[in-house]
Amino acid sequence: MTTQPSAFAQHSALSTQHFLSHSSKIFIAGHRGMVGSAIVRLLQAKGYHNLLLKTREELDLTNQSEVHSFLAEEKPDYIFLAAAKVGGIHANNTFRADFIYENLVIETNIIHGAWKAGVNRLLFLGSSCIYPRDCPQPIREEYLLTGPLEQTNEPYAIAKIAGIKLCESYNRQYGTQYVSVMPTNLYGPNDNYDLLGSHVLPALIRKAHEAKLQGEKSLTVWGTGKPKREFLYVDDMAEACIFLMESGVTEGLFNVGTGYDVTIQELAETVMQVVGFQGTLTFDTSRPDGTPRKLLDVTSMKALGWQAKTTLQNGIAKAYADFLTNQP
Ligand code: GFB
């Protein structure tokens, strides 16, 4: 693996200046979601106390006039755009209209509203599915828009690509400092454990737990078990986001991952080990595999001085502990 930052990330201007003080007003859009809540936990732990948090009932992010009025009135110093409609392979593939519409409208409302309100700094969260389905691995930032997307999540990916291009375009035309981060598959506290809506890791935690309790002999894994995925514990993701905010990066696109991936079968075996379920695996090949592999090249973040800390085994153990505490 190369040790140079990618050409894309090199475009980003770096300043040694820290833009924020602990009293800066920071709006976390999506603070009840898995990523947003992790960002809030870490900001609070680091002493940032002037956080703007709005529930869906208080502020409908799909409503343009509400969002624009809120931003004009509050004028936050910084926005973390972690609000999004997200889900696993089945949800993405089934609710295609909802995924493209809701994500596009949230992004345009917040990014355009931020610019109108004079908010100069924003971090937009995307997803590793923005990259072409069959691009070389590990995936460098400059592979964006070099080939066709994976079909099961194309609408969501298109919306996230639009978010990146919104940030880039406002920076170019209006001189804002909007930065984009592309996380790999995330997991951790506040994850979605609904078996049809969730991503693979929370689904496997729940399935293994229930199989153990019910004394079952086998656990069903969707697809062939052969696709490879990279998994990042959400607290590491939050740390990467705040690291970028504090580092003075003012533009660009940054992959955030661990740099390692596993097959879905290996993942299922690790989950079974952590949960303590000793049965076998059954593969339901009527379910889609999705993209064969999406391992991020994390050279750009490493070059800035950040890398993930949590191992997959430790992360799954923490996620399972959270599942036992918080999932009835
Ligand atoms: O996490 P996942 O739903 O999404 O599925 P993607 C990853 C892989 O795990 C696929 C397999 O090959 C699934 O078939 N899998 C095995 C399972 N068992 C299960 C299960 O019980 N539940 C689920 N959900 N999968 C999503 C995108 O893609 O990744 C989003 O759809 C987003 O847009 C997200 O980018 C990070 O990794 O395939």
Image (cartoon, rainbow, N blue to C red):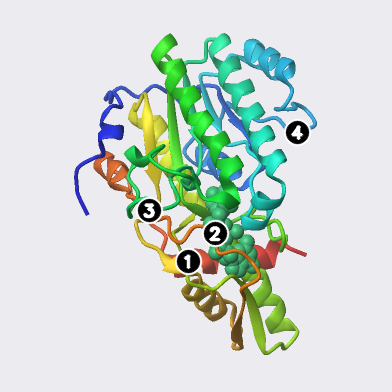
**Label 2 – label 3 distance at C-alpha:** 25 Å
> Which is more N-terminal, label 2 or label 1?
1
- For label 2, the residue is 290
**In the image, which is nearer the foreground, mark 2 or mark 3?**
2
Name the element at disc 2. Answer: loop
Ligand 1 closer than 8 Å to the CB at disc 2?
A: yes
**Label 4 – label 3 distance at C-alpha:** 31 Å
> Which is more N-terminal, label 2 or label 4?
4
Question: Label 2 amino acid?
Answer: Gly
Which of the 4 quarters of the picture holds residue 105? top right
Ligand 1 placement by image quarter:
bottom right
- For label 4, the residue is 56
> Which is more N-terminal, label 4 or label 1?
4
Name the element at disc 1. Answer: loop
Which of the 4 quarters of the picture holds residue 249? top left
Q: Say left or right for 201 vs 230.
A: right
Task: Name the residue furthest right.
Answer: 57
**In the image, which is nearer the foreground, mark 1 or mark 4?**
1
Name the element at disc 3. Answer: loop
Q: Residue at x 67, y 41 (%)?
A: 99
> Which is more N-terminal, label 3 or label 4?
4
Q: Residue at x 28, y 23 (%)?
A: 15
Q: Position of residue 155 (x, y in %)?
A: 61, 41
Q: Residue 227 — which label?
A: 1
Question: Label 3 amino acid?
Answer: Ala
